[in-house]
Image (cartoon, rainbow, N blue to C red):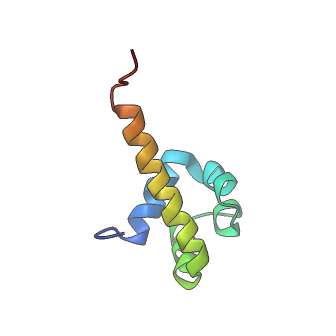
Amino acid sequence: MHGLTLEAIVTALQTEYGWQGLGERIPLRCFTSDPSVASSLKFLRKTPWAREKVESLYLFMLRDQRRQQSPSHRP
């Protein structure tokens, strides 16, 4: 994730999905129990496998947003 901070990624995901939606997509306590950006960052910085899941969801979100914005080429 070149040039992107983990904080920017978590904030973008939270804005797109909300804490509940984020917790449904990646069931981590930092997203489901009294969530905040600060507590999520603290956990994700110490947990590489969870950070990978968050980064993967972020990339999926970007692809999905691009797909929705591009005009359909279907006849």
Task: Pick the quarter of the image with the C terminus.
Answer: top left
Residue 44 left/right relative to 27: left
Task: Tell me which residue sits at (70%, 68%) in the image.
Answer: 29
Task: Tell me which residue sits at (61%, 54%) in the image.
Answer: 22
Nearer to us in this view, 33 or 1: 1
Residue 27 left/right relative to 44: right
Question: Is 29 above or below relative to 13?
Answer: below
Residue 21 left/right relative to 3: right
Residue 5: % across, % down: 36, 71
Task: Pick the quarter of the image with the N terminus.
Answer: bottom left
Nearer to us in this view, 38 or 45: 45
- Residue 65 figure quarter: top left
- Residue 43 figure quarter: bottom right
Outermost residue toward the top in this view: 75
Q: How many marks?
A: 0
Nearer to us in this view, 23 or 1: 1
Question: Is 41 above or below relative to 70?
Answer: below
Question: Is 25 above or below relative to 40?
Answer: above
Residue 37: % across, % down: 51, 66
Nearer to us in this view, 17 or 34: 17
Task: Tell me which residue sits at (51%, 72%) in the image.
Answer: 38
Residue 6: % across, % down: 43, 70
Task: Tell me which residue sits at (28%, 70%) in the image.
Answer: 3
Question: Is 72 above or below relative to 29?
Answer: above
